[in-house]
Image (cartoon, rainbow, N blue to C red):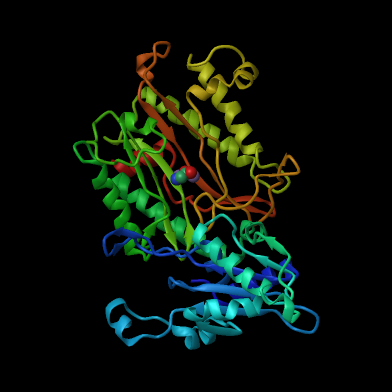
Amino acid sequence: MMHMQSFIAHRKLFAEKMQNGVAIIPTAPERVRNRDAHYPYRFDSYFYYLTGFREPEAVLVIVAATGQAPARHILFCREKNVEREIWDGHRFGPEAAKEIFGFDEAHPLAKLDELLPGLLSDQSAVYTALGQDQNWDQRVVGWLNRVRDLARTGVVAPRGIYDYRPILDEMRLIKSTGELQIMQHAADISAQAHQRAMQAACPGMREYEVEAELLHTFYRHGARAPAYTSIVAGGANACVLHYVQNDAELKSGDLLLIDAGCELDGYASDITRTFPVNGKFTTVQRDIYQLVLAAQAAAIAEVKPGNRWNDPHQAALRVLAQGFIDLGLCLGSVDGVLESEDYKKFYMHRTGHWLGMDVHDVGEYKQQGEWRALQPGMVLTVEPGCYIRPADNVSEDFWNIGIRIEDDVVVTPDGHELLTEAAPKTIVAIEELMR
Ligand code: GLY
Ligand code: MN
Ligand code: MN
């Protein structure tokens, strides 16, 4: 876990960027799976980024500094409760939470309705994630109306209603050294999981048995959840981009595409590797694999400060388009294939996304209509692929080959660094590991 000072620093910077007003930031609600069983709990990313606090039923209130008054960081959380703690386990309670997590104040969650109108009184603005949760929106409106009701006593209600997310998105986009350390650790665990999967996979196994090997490595190293549902897709299933059924039998001669990464301390990793179920690539598989690998290398080479978000994607497209022409999958010139977007028959997604607390992390991709410039501290995935479904005008040799290669890349002052280097990627390395 990151040092508590990092979370406090995030709060301080956020309070400065708000300039004035009050931000009300709830963590995620618990979700019922069926009757009294819940889905595994995952805190809200914005809330966690500002608190480090993992319990459900908590709200952070930040009052920006005004005049002589410094900013206030206030936590509302569950009270200590002997009975509930016997059933559900430890809870910090406001007193301990205030000390341990470094808040200026902490109160029982049950006091939220009582205290918020006072906190909002005579403030110029309220910051909330309007539209994220209708019930929550209603509560915020309720607090605002209670302040408005006090108008004749001279109290002024906030006039501005702003979204706190754009401010936090820009902060979250640039990762600190502490965040990068966690992301490296998460990536190492995931890389090890992919190695284990390669060593375990063999014809006759079910996809979910390989998924179990991934989860084994995640859990063994303290990453208690995948960052997203693992894709374990043998043969034709690899051509289904969001395949998560993971229950088919693996066949000799097929490829296995695995897109899986763990979440560690709130940070995601996201790796895809594709390898032969029987440990040996066929000639055709080899040709397509080398093409995707070359496209990925070209894309990764474009990850450096000053280059634009879209540059890696364009580099990958150019290599793939040339490859599709060479293999007879597309006709004409590279520029022609790029212009007509004929490549989309075999490569229909983009080449990456921001990565951080959320696997598809926050942060704008364009600014003032232009693809944004890459800056040190940004983390992105680079994940070109090729998916060939059976079609009349495609040689049968290529049918049902689905390949994607995905790595997590940090922008550094000099260029980039790969977080996921430890997951074998060349044909030689994969075949050797599987031998
Ligand atoms: N695993 C989700 C993605 O690659 O975007
Ligand atoms: Mn990805
Ligand atoms: Mn992925």
* Picture coordinates of residue 270, whole percent (x, y): 46, 49
Q: Residue furthest left?
A: 204
Q: Where, by quadrant of the figure, is residue 340 drawn?
A: top right
Q: Is 6 on the left or on the right of 161, as rendered? A: left
Of 54 and 246, which appears nearest the observer?
54
193 up-or-down from 241: above or below: below
Q: Residue at x 55, y 52 (%)?
A: 361
Q: Is 197 on the left or on the right of 53, as rendered? A: left
Q: Residue at x 68, y 71 (%)?
A: 148
Number of marks: 0
Of 283 and 310, which appears nearest the observer?
310
Whether residue 318 appears in this view of the structure is yes
330 up-or-down from 248: above or below: above
Q: Is 263 on the left or on the right of 412, as rendered? A: left
Q: Where, by quadrant of the figure, is residue 206 drawn?
A: top left
* Picture coordinates of residue 70, whole percent (x, y): 73, 82
Whether residue 155 appears in this view of the structure is no
Of 184 and 165, which appears nearest the observer?
165
395 up-or-down from 272: above or below: above
* Picture coordinates of residue 254, whole percent (x, y): 29, 30
Q: Residue at x 60, y 26 (%)?
A: 318
434 up-or-down from 281: above or below: below
* Picture coordinates of residue 337, whole percent (x, y): 59, 18
Q: Residue at x 54, y 66 (%)?
A: 139
Q: Residue furthest right?
A: 67
Quadrant location of the C terminus? top left
